[in-house]
Structure formats: C-alpha cells, structure tokens
Image (tube, grey):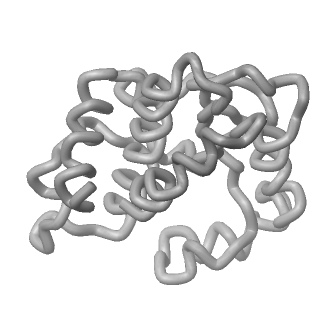
Amino acid sequence: LGHFLLTNLLLDKIKEAPEGRIVVVSSSAHTYSSKLDLDTVHSEEHYGRFGAYVKSKFANVLFANALSKRLSGTKVTVNSLDPGAVKTDIQRHTLLFRVPKALLGWLLMKNAKEGAQTSIHVAVSEDIKDVTGKYFVNCKVSAASKLAMDEEAAEQLWAKSVEWTGL
C-alpha cells in the first residue's frame, strides 16, 4: 500500500512536470502468484514470508498497470520492472535463500550497481520516454505473468487500495 499511497499523494505534482515517470520495482517472484486474494492479504493465518513477498510483487505489477491505464493520454508514464537477483540482505531471514546465496550468489547474482541498471533505464532512458504500461527485465520490455496483466484484478486491487488508504 505504500507505493499506492505515496504515488497518489504525489500524482498532481507528477502530472505538472514536463515529463513524468513512475517506476514500480517488482520482481520475477510475481509469477508465483496464482490468484488475487484480497480476503487473506491481512491474515496472520495465511501469512508466510515468501508468500507475502510474492503477493506484494504481484500487487506492484497490477498497481503499475492500473495506474498506467488511468494516466493514458497524459505526459506521465508508468512501468514496472524486475531488477533481477541482487546481492542484498532481503533474504536474510529465509534459510532457503541464505545457503544458495552463500554458495552461488557471487556467480549468479548481480551486485547493487548491476541490479540498479533496469531501474535507472526505465527512469531516464530517452529511448523509452513514451513507453507506458510495460514490464522490464534487464533493460528490455518483457512479459509479466498472464495474471499480472488481468485488468479486472488490477481494478479490484485498486478499489481495495483506495478503501484501505482512505483516498
């Protein structure tokens, strides 16, 4: 909800800019989401660290798509992206990721500078200044999951986000 609330609070200022870009960082983990289940989002009974991460990244793509649609015809673009597997401490509490990270991280994962490249590209590249509603991986347009492209799910999430934030 933080992305949703902050972006909406800043939206009038962003629209006033000569060229506005909203960049929403997601993850390939969004592809593990099997459905939009707004009834269990705040449930302690259905909470799991990885599941919560997956749901949040899925919601980020839905949010970006819904916002892009709302801003169609303006000077503001909205895109989401996957920075890739980056050597950070985000997995510090997940044993499943700590061991492989220690063993293979230096081979397979990006360092922070490499991991920032897609975010920077989407934020400032002149080549994509008019591109909106897309999902980027490794500085290129890529396919988000089919479920993440579901306009009805995006609208349901948008409506619930408005309700939860009081906007």
Looking at this rendering, what residue extends furthest in the front direction? 16
Residue 90, position as x, y percentages in the image: 58, 73
Q: Please name the residue shown 42% across and 40% down the image.
A: 63
Q: Is residue 5 above or below residue 70?
A: below
Q: Is residue 35 left or right of residue 150?
A: left
Q: Is residue 66 above or below residue 84?
A: above
Q: Quadrant of residue 40?
A: bottom left
Q: Please name the residue shown 32% across and 32% down the image.
A: 154
Q: Quadrant of residue 73?
A: top right
Q: Is residue 158 left or right of residue 139?
A: left
Q: Is residue 44 left or right of residue 108?
A: left
Residue 141, position as x, y percentages in the image: 71, 24
Residue 33, position as x, y percentages in the image: 34, 41
Q: Is residue 94 left or right of residue 136?
A: left
Q: Please name the residue shown 36% across and 60% down the image.
A: 1
Q: Is residue 146 visible?
A: yes
Looking at this rendering, what residue extends furthest in the bottom direction? 93
